[in-house]
């Protein structure tokens, strides 16, 4: 697969991310009011269920998808007024893995690679995937500093930084393998903040990263390729929402309503992007136009799509998401990111279609 592309699809996202830098890129961890059209109350998309009294610890990340819209509009709280819902900020998939490992989370947004890692030895957490928050495209991008670098092959002999075990790492190594460049570049493991510091000191030539670090690198760097290309190469990456099996077993009514609310978040992103972008802008602390630009880096599967064979399918006829997670596990094992593989049914059985199937009826 050739890495030579015009990058036209990235330009809007680049402009948005540069604006994000200008605005400080701050993330608001608490609830704030919309600056224009939010009056403090949003109706539940279905009849609220006051009988649900679940206590749920939900991890969230600063990623522009339906989970942020749901959090901002307090839709879970509106639909389950007697539930005890606490939102906990997670800075990375690694944070989520640790939190699940210490039993301090019930549900959390997490990348597909970290979710698989948590389900693998030595952690072997009994996790189920409840929802696809987004399919990652240009939101995770390889950025190079040298203007002469136009393709992945141009980085031969150079150093690329990426957080190991992340969806970005998965995409990078997929495309290096496609191009036969695995042994021709130096790939090093750095956290997002360390990537920025190494970039500023001139210690790395390129980095595959996401927001808000992506915006910082784009100030004097330029995009080369992205997760959208790895998806075309047969290795799609996702931001998922996962939950523990014990929580799922004990709270079926909560999971049903939670799925209704997530479906509403996806609907707003696809059908009312201006409304969704208002929530994204509030939660990320960026201009609304910048938030709209950030949405272009992702695809947001609808409830109906998630219930289809491409993703969850049904309990009787599982979709293809499980096979994708199993392939991710094989990749992580080959890269030494997990100690070993669990049995294949652990991965193919991670998708939990029950609530999606029920709500989609």
Image (cartoon, rainbow, N blue to C red):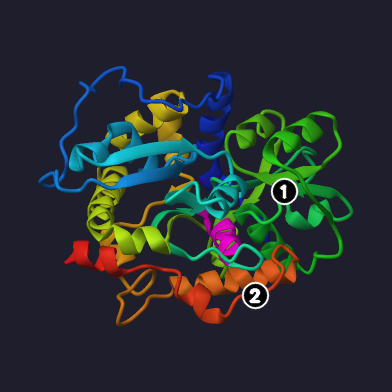
In the figure, residue 92 lies in which quadrant?
Answer: top right
Extreme residue in the right direction = 157
Q: Secondary structure at mark 2?
A: loop
The relative height of residue 330 versus residue 54 in the rendered view (above or below) is: below
Indicate which disc, 2 or 1, sits on the residue closer to the N terminus.
1
Residue 254 left/right relative to 331: left
Residue 230 left/right relative to 176: left
Range covered by the magenta-colored residues: 111-119
Residue 29 left/right relative to 231: left
Give the foreground label among 2 and 1: 2
Q: CA distance from mark 2 to mark 1?
A: 23 Å
- Comparing 267 with 345, the one in front is 345
Residue 83 % position (x, y): 25, 42
Residue position for label 1: 162
Residue 308 left/right relative to 177: left
Residue position for label 2: 341
Q: Residue at x 57, y 38 (%)?
A: 91
Extreme residue in the left direction = 47
Q: Residue at x 80, y 39 (%)?
A: 146
């Amino acid at each position: 697969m050739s890495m030579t592309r015009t990058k036209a699809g990235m330009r809007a996202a680049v402009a948005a991310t540069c604006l994000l830098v200008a605005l400080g890129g701050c993330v608001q961890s608490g609830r704030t009011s919309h600056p224009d059209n939010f009056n403090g109350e949003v109706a539940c998309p279905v009849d609220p269920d006051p009988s649900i009294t679940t206590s749920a610890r939900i991890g969230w990340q600063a990623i522009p998808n339906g989970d942020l819209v749901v959090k901002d509009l307090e839709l879970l709280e509106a639909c389950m007024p007697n539930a005890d819902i606490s939102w906990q900020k997670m800075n990375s998939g690694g944070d989520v893995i640790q939190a699940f490992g210490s039993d301090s989370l019930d549900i959390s947004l997490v990348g597909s690679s970290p979710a698989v890692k948590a389900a693998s030895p030595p952690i072997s957490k009994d996790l189920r995937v409840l929802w696809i928050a987004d399919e990652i495209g240009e939101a995770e991008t390889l950025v190079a500093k040298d203007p002469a670098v136009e393709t992945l092959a141009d980085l031969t002999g150079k150093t690329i930084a990426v957080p190991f075990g992340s969806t970005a790492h998965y995409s990078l190594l997929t495309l290096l393998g496609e191009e036969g460049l695995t042994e021709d570049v130096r790939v090093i493991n750095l956290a997002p903040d360390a990537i920025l510091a190494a970039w500023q000191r001139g210690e790395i030539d390129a980095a595959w990263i996401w927001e808000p670090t992506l915006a910082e690198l784009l100030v004097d760097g330029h995009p080369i390729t992205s997760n959208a290309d790895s998806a075309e190469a047969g290795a799609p990456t996702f931001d998922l929402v996962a939950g523990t099996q014990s929580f799922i077993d004990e709270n079926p009514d909560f999971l049903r309503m939670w799925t209704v609310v997530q479906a509403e978040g996806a609907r707003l992103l696809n059908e009312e992007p201006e409304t969704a972008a208002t929530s994204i802008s509030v939660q990320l602390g960026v201009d609304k136009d910048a938030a709209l630009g950030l949405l272009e880096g992702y695809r947001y599967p609808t409830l109906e799509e998630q219930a289809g064979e491409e993703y969850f399918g049904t309990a009787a006829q599982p979709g293809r998401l499980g096979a994708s997670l199993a392939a991710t596990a094989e990749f992580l094992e080959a890269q030494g990111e997990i100690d070993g593989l669990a049995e294949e049914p652990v991965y193919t059985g991670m998708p939990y279609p029950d609530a999606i199937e029920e709500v989609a009826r």
